[in-house]
Image (cartoon, grey):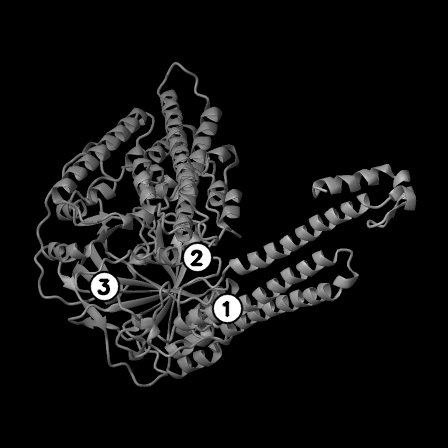
Amino acid sequence: MLFDNKFQSKIYAPWKGQYINYANLKKLLKEGVILKNAWTETDEQNFVSALDSDLEKVYTFQRDKYNELNDILNELQASTTDPSAEFDFLGFTSKLELVLSLAQELNHFQRLNYTGFAKIVKKHDRLHPAYSVKPLLNVRLKSLPFHSEDYLPLLFKISALFQFLRDNYNLDQSVSKLSSFNDDSMIEQYKSFKFWIHPDNLMEVKATILRRLPMLVYNQKNGFDDDDDDDDEDDPFKLSKNDPTINCLYFDSESFDLYNNKLIKLPNASTLRLKWIGPLYNKPEIVLEKKVFEKQSETYDEDEKLVLKEKYLDSFVGGKFDSGKYLKKMAKKGRSEQEIEDTRKRISSLSDYIEENNFQPCLRTTYKRTAFQIPGDDNVRVVIDSDIYFIREDAFDQQRPIRDPHKWHRTDIDSRVSNPFSLLRKGEYVKFMYAEMEIKVKTRRTSKKLAWVDDLAQSHLVKEIPNFSKFVHGISSLFLEDDKLENIPFWYNELESDLKMDPQQALIDNKEKLAKLKAEEENLLKFKSKLASSFSSLSCYAPRRKSFSVSGMGLPEPAKSSVGLESITETHPGELKATSGSDLNMSSAEYEDKDVNKRSIASLKKIQATISKLLDVDSEEEEEVELPIGVSEPESYIKNAGPLRIEPKVWLANERTFYRWLHVTTLLSTLTFIIYLSTSRANFTQLATWLAYLYFALTLFSGVWGYYIFMRRREIIIERSDSHLDNVFGPLFVAFGLMAGLIINFVYGFQSAAQSVRSTNAADIGVYAVTGVTFEYLERNPWQKRVLEFVFWIVGA
């Protein structure tokens, strides 16, 4: 289904007129017009004007609707503190449920419009590269930031009011969509924060962390057992001087179900991936992992994990794996019955999951990882991933698959070559321009503060990108124009802005941000204090603070909410020993997947989960590189250096087009000779002769044009050029030539007929000699005579 059809189907009917007019913008693009000068300055102005108008409309509506919902919540809060008024329980509950429902629709409105703007701008810049509007969109989104609205203030108020109903009126837990948000027995164990780091700042960030945490550097262990049947689970990590290259191969379907579900955080949304460390020719341990998103804890918890050797993966992914033979080998090695049974269940579950949903490997991420943690102390853990690449490995296009459909991975980039990325073509991979850092802080009921973490997170060295995911970013970058991508993450435009900031300006911006957060926190505390007389458990709803302080993540007393940061005892890095490499062996795209207790959940995080926010995306387009002085663009590209391998279907398609032109040439030549040979029997010999000449000219042109197009396409294919294979001039010339022949035949034919009629004494011979219609017939049918005279008038006779 095309995106504009999906867009129309997902519109919330009462707000239909407030959405981006995607169909109109697409019409203004003139997508179907491929003439060379079809797009003019006027067309560009019309498109930009319509785009800006829609941005204004969407932003204004979203802002007004947000304020309207906030006013309703304030009115509901006021009704709870008015002792003179009789409390309307049903009306209060109905309004509150309505506000929650509209807040969810407003969030969906936000992400759907953002996706529409991103896609239409991408389409515009592809069709009309001389008029790029992406920078304009980025500037306007900064002044009209409808996509970055924070719904937490609304959610805090909604949660507080539902808590008021539960504590005072025995509200049925099933009535409220937020009924599970006040589970005090569930406390989140970790909070995760993700950042982007500019390459120029990477060393400074690492140095800052090293002053507090030692660095764990680990790599793949060599020395596997030579026996291919050995399935012992060896520890694949050891200390090394080199950062390990981690490979994750993600699965998804042609409709990108896993991507779409993960992006909007649907309950029980899953991710499926293969993971290994280092190059495949070193025979690393390969792990198939299925993660399930826990809506309550906002984490991806490991649901199933299966370790397989590479030789089994082709059959496993293809649905032809012989599990019986595999389990017999396990039994021969003396594995326990319980272990064999657990393995059998995992094999059955994972293979059925892949087969039933038509999942296939589609995206590979590769990156180098550095981890920081005090051995034995998991209060703070920092992971930095650099040199991140996203590579297509799908076989969605059965005619031109990226990966051999019968293989579980791309064999070209896993071969023993010094630079595997040299084998990739443009559009098959994207290099992420920044490094990614994730900070995981353990939450406890304690007053200890982490000032140095706050300072780092608020510095000019990093930029926070909540909920960033490598899987989501890779899919959105490589498949952005695919209509099956229903949503685009909100970090899309962040890559267009420079992460390198002036330290002084960053300090000023940070102070303004903290002042805004403090004002919001004070407003929420005032709101809660007004309801505190009715119930006491509301204090657990502490808003996210500006700091990473552990006290701000547990259940502090309201009076302590504004306490400043305290310094923690500085820990000096000592001699290192990686005691638990597997804990740090995760892709940070799924670092939320593991090491988080399933029972961990904070009330605030649950609220965020109900109206999850779709974060931004980046385009996969690479910026044009400005060559330094003395360096010129190469005349030939490396991609053209290898032997020319062209699939037969490409040649056959070119030949098929040539045959069709030959067919048209044959038809035109037949028409030409029929007319020319019948001129002697024609009513107007001279006219028939000239028409025969016209059709003969079209015949010659058709033959020459067919040969020209055939040779031109052959050159493009051999040169591996990205030029267009189509050319509209030839078909248009033939079409207009045929139209001209018909019009000339019509006009001059009837003009000659009119002259013949007037030169004949029709009254004497009783016929319209040339037309073949008798005079008596026209007398009986005067309307036909008027039609004939009207035609004569049309042709100017």
Disc on the earlier residue, 1 or 3: 3
Distance, label 2 to label 1, CA atoms, is 47 Å
Which secondary structure lies at badge 3? strand
Question: In this picture, is 533 found above or below 436?
Answer: above
Nearest the camera: 523 or 716? 716
Question: In this picture, is 84 found above or below 736?
Answer: above
Is the residue marked by circle 2 packed among few (<14), some (14-19), or many (20+) residues within 10 Å? Answer: many
Q: Which residue is mark 3?
A: 369
Q: How many marks?
A: 3
Corner quadrant of residue 104: top left
Extreme residue toward the bottom, this view = 227
Place of residue 753 in the rendered image (x, y in percent of width and height, measured from the top left):
77, 48
Place of residue 151 in the rendered image (x, y in percent of width and height, measured from the top left):
35, 37
- Kind of residue at disc 3: Arg
- Kind of residue at disc 1: Tyr
Comparing marks 2 and 1, which lies closer to the viewer?
1
* Residue at the image position 33 percent from the left and 55 percent from the top: 469
Place of residue 512 in the rendered image (x, y in percent of width and height, measured from the top left):
19, 35
Q: Is residue 77 left or right of residue 521?
A: right
- Kind of residue at disc 2: Leu
Q: Which residue is mark 2?
A: 258
Is the residue marked by circle 1 packed among few (<14), some (14-19), or many (20+) residues within 10 Å? Answer: few
Question: In this picture, is 321 found above or below 215?
Answer: below
Distance, label 3 to label 2, CA atoms, is 25 Å
Disc on the earlier residue, 3 or 2: 2
Distance, label 1 to label 3, CA atoms, is 54 Å
Question: In this picture, is 671 found above or below 233?
Answer: above
Q: Is residue 782 left or right of residue 80?
A: right
Residue 398 visible? The answer is no
* Residue at the image position 35 percent from the left and 48 percent from the top: 132
CB within 8 Å, label 1 to label 3: no
Which secondary structure lies at badge 2? helix
